[in-house]
Image (cartoon, grey):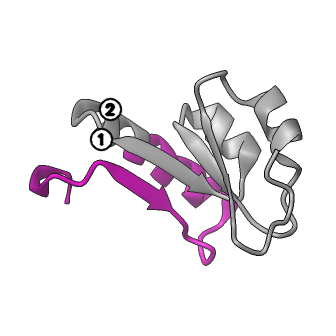
Amino acid sequence: VLEGGVTTILLREPQLSAEQLAVLAEKTVEACQAWRARTIISRDVDLAHACGADGVHLGWDSPSVDEVRKKMPRDAHASPSPQVTEWS
C-alpha cells in the first residue's frame, strides 16, 4: 500500500487485543516513517503517543481535543469523528 503512494494510514483494528494492537501500531509507524507517510491511530490516545503515531482519530467517547493535545506532541493531528461536536 505504501509503495503505491498512500500518504496516511488510519489504524483501526478493534478485534485485536491491546498487546496485538500495540505491536501492529509500532510496525505500522515504522513502515510509514520509512515511506514518509503518516500513521493515525483510531481512538487510543495513549497508544498513539506511545508508538509515536502522527495523530489520533477521536470517537464520540474519546477525550476532548484539548485533552488529547496535552498528551500528544505539538504537531500531532487530533481529528474528531463527525459525531463529536467539540472541535476546539
- Is 60 in the magenta? no
Marks 2 and 1: CB-CB under 8 Å?
A: yes
Helix, strand or loop at label 2? It is: helix
Q: Residues within 10 Å of mark 2 (few under 14, many from 20)?
A: some
Q: Quadrant of the N terminus?
A: bottom left
Q: How far from the left and from the top, in percent, is residue 55?
A: 58, 42
Q: How far from the left and from the top, in percent, is residue 18?
A: 68, 58
Q: How far from the left and from the top, in percent, is residue 88?
A: 82, 44
Left or right: 3 with respect to 84? left
Amino acid at circle 1 = Ala
Left or right: 32 with respect to 51? left
Amino acid at circle 2 = Gln
Q: Can you say whether 36 is above or below 7 in the image?
A: above
Q: How far from the left and from the top, in percent, is residue 14?
A: 63, 74
Instruction: Quote the CA–CA distance across marks 2 and 1.
Output: 5 Å
Residue at image position (27%, 33%) is: 36
Q: Residues within 10 Å of mark 1 (few under 14, many from 20)?
A: some
Residue at image position (56%, 59%) is: 20
According to the image, label 2 marks what residue? 33
Q: Quadrant of residue 77?
A: top right
Q: Nearer the viewer, residue 34 or 20?
A: 34
Residue at image position (80%, 39%) is: 68
Q: Quadrant of residue 52?
A: top right
Helix, strand or loop at label 1? It is: helix
According to the image, label 1 marks what residue? 31
Left or right: 27 with respect to 77? left
Give, as a single range, the part of the protein colored magenta. Answer: 1-28
